[in-house]
Amino acid sequence: MAANSTNGEVQKSNYLDSISGIIKQDQDNQGQKVAQLYDDWTTSYDKDLEKLNYRGPLKVASILAEFSDSKDIKVLDCGCGTGLVGEALKDAGFTNVSAVDISQKSLDIAEKKGIYQKLVCDEVGKECMPFIDNEFDALVCIGCVGPSHISPVAFREWARIVKPGGVTVFSVRHCYLRVTQGEEELHSERFAENFNEMLEELRSTKKMELMSKTDVPNFMGTTAACIYAMKVL
């Protein structure tokens, strides 16, 4: 990536290209590379996503509000980045939001926004998260579940740290789960199989059940995604 470029548009393209390159590799144990990439991107991350008309934060805040009886519930923003989702949750009236992300520099920016009660730097996709059982009433994870990023394996931990009756809301880009025109190289058969197997495991073991599934055609730019809302049992 040309991090020393003086052209904001070129730099943005290079960061996005770097992320796409990691996604295409679809490899486990990419945490260090992912953390470094997002650390480097922090200086222009918010502006770059604004240019792409990133709709994920507003959409997840709306969906969480639909399934929440109170705005005072304890929410975990999983893969919070620089806090764009946290800002949307605050604007929607949620008052008790904590955050976890793999990029410390992203967390540093998020902390300055004053929107989170607690911030934790940790790799979200691993099988053990640094939270106690039933710690949260809800969990949101937008733009992070995908190849080489947050693995569907993390859903087991989400079911552990969210209280029974609580809700998890997360997004997955269409191209990760099926071949999509213009984004064929980002499709991962391995990820799609793991994703579907994990959803079936959660259903069959009565850990979570699907509440809603919302297609967002222009989730970020022209990229489409699906937002799942699942109830913890």
Image (cartoon, grey):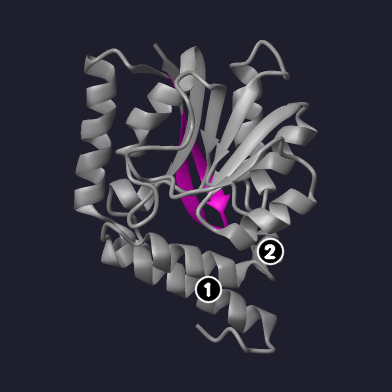
Is disc 2 in contact with disc 1, using a CB cutoff of under 8 Å? no
Separation (CA) of disc 2 from disc 1: 14 Å
Q: Quadrant of residue 96?
A: top right
In this rendering, is residue 156 above or below 52? above
Mark drawn on residue 15: 1
How many numbered marks, from 0 up?
A: 2
Q: What x and y, as percent, mark residue 52?
A: 63, 61
In the image, is residue 216 part of the stretch drawn in magenta? yes
Amino acid at dot 2:
Lys
Local crowd size for mark 1, using a 10 Å CA cut-off: few (<14), some (14–19), many (≥20): many
Residue 27 in percent (x, y) is at 26, 61
Task: Classify 152 as above or below 179.
Answer: above
User: Disc 1 marks which amino acid?
Assistant: Tyr
Tell which of 170 and 4 is nearer to you.
4
Q: Secondary structure at mark 2?
A: helix
Residue 226 part of the magenta-drawn span: yes
Depicted 3 relative to depicted 109: above or below: below
Q: Position of residue 54 (x, y in %)?
A: 63, 52
Q: Which residues are magenta?
A: 211-228
Q: Main secondary structure of the magenta part?
A: strand
Disc 1 element: helix
Residue in the image at 64% along x and 35% along y: 98
Q: Nearer the viewer, mark 2 or mark 1?
A: 1
Q: Position of residue 8 (x, y in %)?
A: 68, 80
- Using the rendered view, name the quadrant where residue 40 is placed: bottom right
The quarter of the picture where the C terminus appears is top left
Q: Residues within 10 Å of mark 2 (few under 14, many from 20)?
A: few
| Residue 51, numbered circle | 2
Name the residue rendered at 47%, 40% in the picture. 171
Give left or right: position of 167 versus 177: right
